[in-house]
Each structure stands twice: as C-alpha cells, then as structure tokens.
Image: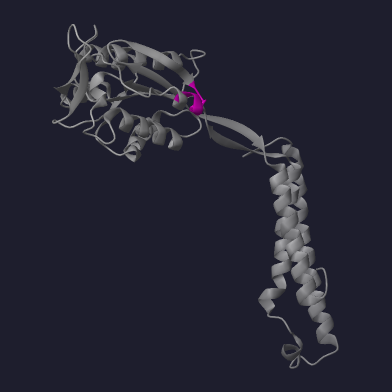
Amino acid sequence: MSFGSPYLLLCLLAIPPAVGGYVLLERRRRAAGAAWSSPALIPNMVSQPRRRRSIPAVLMLLGATLLLVGFARPQANFSSLKPGATIVFTLDVSGSMASKDIKPSRLAAAEAAIRQFVKTLPASYRVALVTFASDFSVPVAPTYDRPALLAALPPKTQLQASAIGDAVGEAVKVASRALVPTSAHTAQPPAAVLLLSDGGQNSGRLTLPQAAAAAKAAGVPVSALVLGTPGGSVTQLVNVSGTSKKFSEVTQVPVEPADVKALVAASGGTFLENAPAAALDTIVHSLAPRLVHDRQLREITIGLSAAALVLIAAGALLSGLWFRRLV
C-alpha cells in the first residue's frame, strides 16, 4: 500500500492522546462513583460487565484511526486479467463427420461441444473459427462476439476429403496474429487451437508433423477432441450413370486418432477422445499459467472512510444502548 499524501499520516499522532484521554475519563468516573458509595456496593450497582465498557470506545477509536489514514489517500495494487486470450476452433466438416456412430452425428456432437464450451469460456477470451474439408476457410476471425461464432457453425458436412494439416496450419496463423505484441516489453495473452475432427488426413499439402512443428515454433499449443468409433460409416446416394436412378453406398470411416494424438503431443496441447464438453475446460486450465494480468494502483480512500464511519457509528450506537451516553 502507498499514500497519495503521506504527510497527512501525522494526524495519527492524535490517536495516543485520545486513548489516554479515554483512560483518564474512565478513572474519574470510577473515582466519582467511589466518592458517594460504599466500595462493597459498587459491584451491585454496575449493570454492565467490565469488558463490555471498552467495546464502544475501541470501535470508535478504530474508526477514527481508519478515517485519519483515509486523509492520506491510501492506494493499493489491484490485479485484473488482461483480455485477449484466444481459442481458435478448427472444425472438420469433411464427409466422414456425417457418420452417426456418435449420436446424433460426429459433426453435431462437435458443434454441441463448441456451444457448451463457449458458454463456460471466461469473458476475457476471444474466439475464432476455422472450418475445413479438402480446403479451409476462416468464417470468424478472433472476436469477443460469441453469437457471431455460434451463428457461423456449419449445419452439414461437405462430400470432400480431410486436410487436417492445412487447417491446423491456418489456425496457427490466425492464433499467431492474435499473439503479436504491441511493443518489445508488452506481454500478450496466450492463444491455442482446438481441433474437432475424427482424424485421418487424406488431402492437403501440409502433413500433421509439419503442422505440429509450425504450432510449436509459434508457441501455440494444439488441443484436439477426436470424435468417432472404429465402426463408423456414412451412407451416400450415388447416381446410376445414364439414368435418374440412385442407390445407397455405404463407406466405412473409422476414427483415426493416432496421427492427431501425435500432433497434439508435439505441440504441447491436450488430447481428448469422445469426451464430454465439460472436459474441454482442461484446455482453458492449460493456458492459465500463461495468462497476463494487469496491475493498477487505485485509491481506496472511499472504501476506507466508509468502513471508518461504520465502526464509529457502531461504537456510538452500542454506547447509547448500553450506557445511555455517547462515550
């Protein structure tokens, strides 16, 4: 704690004389009582316990002390979380995410996880969205506008392959842009990528090890929620060549977590498989040690003065109720 006007602390020198004055006043009261009564009768005439007599005075003296300290404009350091920590959701919308081995479907489960996670995410966090199949897009750049991100979640999958490496590479770039410091001495809040996929890359230019290396170099951990089972499949309607007829074609799309798990381990993230949305909180917890706090010096004169007045009023009230006097 510091003081805006420290020289006013000299007012506290008035407290010891006030204490001495109260002690002398109490002695005079006792002497006056003894002058017109028998010492043997005094215990019968005292209606209040001896300890209780000092409580109002102590409260009023404490209040006066705080009030005098308030004259010196006390200031205290307060720490607040600096906004700007960023989570980049990277959502797989390739054809395999239509599999219903995870109810109601892999994509629907991933969307539900994002919605639940966003609800519990601290308000100081920004969110962004990258979607991908054979190619990727960034429908939502880092923002505090949660409804905008939720409105951009894709309603259905695309009949395309899965380029996980390219998507993660782009998500790392989005996160890295959020990490750019304003000056050489200004710390920035952290960023992380959350991949929601069923694993198994079969398209794209960037491999998963290359994406992991890019994430590690940028200081952006990639966490993942992998959804699906080994027995997953999707059913598609296929046109019969030269006719208007269609037939159903079933394609096996087993979950492939191994490569994604290696990506997560290499980048320093958290790996989850078919986990409930609540488990995603571990991603926020993993960022906690890297969060940046602002320290601000604020004057607390008003709060201290209010506490002082409460103590003085309480002391005066108790003295009036117990002894029918102010002091």
Q: Quadrant of residue 272?
A: top left
43 to the left or right of 242: right
Q: Position of residue 88 (x, y in %)?
A: 39, 22
On screen, 65 above or below 231? below
In the image, 215 versus 322, the foreground residue is 215
Is residue 147 found inside the magenta-colored segment of the image? yes
Q: How is the image coloured?
A: one colour
On-image quarter of the N terminus:
top right
Q: Position of residue 70 (x, y in %)?
A: 73, 45
Q: Quadrant of residue 214?
A: top left
At x 33% / y 31%, what residue is drawn? 108
At x 70% / y 58%, what residue is drawn? 62
In the image, 212 versus 43, the foreground residue is 212
At x 73% / y 67%, what residue is drawn? 56
312 to the left or right of 251: right
Report the magenta residues as a range: 143-149
On screen, 36 above or below 201? below
Res 156 seen here: yes
99 to the left or right of 25: left
Q: Position of residue 220 (x, y in %)?
A: 34, 20
On screen, 41 above or below 301? below
Res 19 seen here: no
212 to the left or right of 310: left
At x 72% / y 39%, what residue is drawn? 73
Q: Position of residue 215 (x, y in %)?
A: 30, 16
